[in-house]
Image: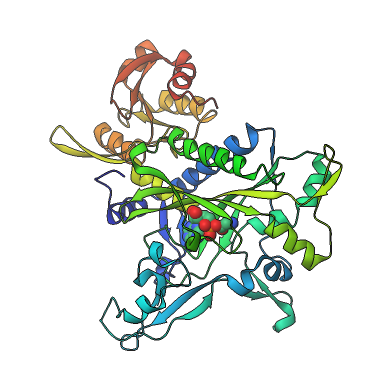
Amino acid sequence: MSTKATVEKLVSLCKRRGLVFQSSEIYGGIGGFWDYGPLGVELKNNIKQAWWKAVVQERDDVVGQDAAIVMNPTVWKASGHLDTFADPMVDCKECKKRFRADDLVGAVAAGTHGHEAAVKASRCPECGGELTEPRMFNLMFKTYVGPVENDASTAYLRPETAQGIFVNFLNVLTATRKKLPLGIAQIGKAFRNEITPGNFIFRDREFEQMEIEYFVKPGTDEEWHKHWVEERYNWYLGLGLRKENVRVRRLEPEEQAHYAKDTYEVEYLFPMGWSELEGIANRTDFDLRRHAEFSGRELEYFDEESGEHIVPYVIEPSAGVDRLLMAFLVDAYDEEEVRKETRVILRLHKDLAPIKVAVLPLSRNEKLVPPAREVWALVRKHWMSQYDDAQSIGRRYRRQDEVGTPLCVTVDFDTLEDEAVTIRERDSMEQVRVPIAGLVEALREKMNTGD
Ligand code: GAP
């Protein structure tokens, strides 16, 4: 973590610069829901694209899909979510506030269901009042499909994207004619009625997941599990998270989800401490067997080598986009003294930066506007870019630094003579002069991201 980033500073920067807003803010907001503004949606898209490139585009053993959010409710019976996807909740008898019981005794130590004695001994963290007995609270949001609201029409907003992959396993296998190991990747919204959402976008009620269900032959699962833990850890470092802020932790048996034999978490050192970024679980054949049982369909793979029908095991790397976005912001946030002023800077990886290039005419002088507009037209074909001519050039550089723009291009009065412009780098603040004719090539070289 950057020692300079606090949750308060991030929330303020995100609002001020159009990264993240509280949902329905003009009505007082709604807990656990957030909106992404013009720069936030760019950052989010860049995170998703970087993930898709690494796990689908650059591999020959993973394909993509996009399933519906509302599914046949039997899916959630089969997956175990209707019966077990619940958190223990307690209410304060005095101030009526509601808490997750495991938060009161430390989530890691408590697991989900245990430690009743420790919970009983706890008092309300807000007012010190007496707490109720823990009650299990199912985290799935309910809705109704069609015009009649009754038990038969009840459906759920998916609490994970994963089940949309399990129920499509045979469709994808047949359509692609692929062999095992085969991964199916998906990015999409998930919903959980969290008891205590919080820490900005870390724990939300609506969020986005990037999940892979990687189907393997039983017996090879542990080896593939190791492979995916390494792959995913290195992906974070490749996108610039500092090594000292990222760690891998193996979960204790009592921390495992109901479907998992073994799980590793990639954790990040957030301002509130080490917390999960991504879970990488060995789900065994739990889900395929359960869906086979509940649907009556055989969800098997014919293994030509052994001549047998097998139920594959599954390794599942599962990450949350919003949580990753927060980690990338925390890690990139920096403040430094430049000419007796504080320069706030997001040292984001170039692939993630919402705006890649800003085009800045030195002033609004009418002679500078046409060439500056022409330069912008040239640049915007290749990269997400911005044109900014408001206030002093120094201020405009700071504005771009603050949102992580790696390169600024300045058009000045010399441009009118020499048909050249200045490229200024965010991190070093170094400036080089290049001819407009070679600008795109020079930017591409500095960006090293292609277009
Ligand atoms: N399919 C497995 C699964 O959903 P999970 O550990 O519950 O596992 C995976 O969730 C990832 O989704 C987490 O590591 C986290 O990044 C993200 N996530 C989970 N709940 C979240 C929430 N309430 N708000 C934001 N992100 C969340």
What percent of the width, then of the height, locates residue 208?
54, 55
Residue drawn 69% across the image and 71% down it: 77
270 relative position to 136: left or right: left
Q: Is residue 450 above or below residue 280?
A: above
Q: Is residue 123 above or below residue 158?
A: below
Q: Is residue 110 above or below residue 131?
A: above
What percent of the width, then of the height, locates residue 429?
28, 26
What percent of the width, then of the height, locates residue 392?
25, 35
Which image quadrant: the C terminus? top right
What percent of the width, then of the height, locates residue 373?
45, 28
Which image quadrant: the N terminus? top left
272 relative position to 265: left or right: left
Q: Quadrant of residue 302?
A: top right
Farthest residue toward the bottom?
A: 93
Residue drawn 48% across the image and 35% down it: 234
Most foreground residue, 309 or 7: 309
Most foreground residue, 153 or 437: 153
417 relative position to 53: left or right: left
Specify how the rendered protein is coloured: rainbow
Task: Note whether residue 319 is visible.
Answer: no
Q: Count the marks.
A: 0
Residue drawn 71% across the image and 67% down it: 78
Task: Note whether residue 199 is visible.
Answer: yes
Most foreground residue, 392 or 111: 111
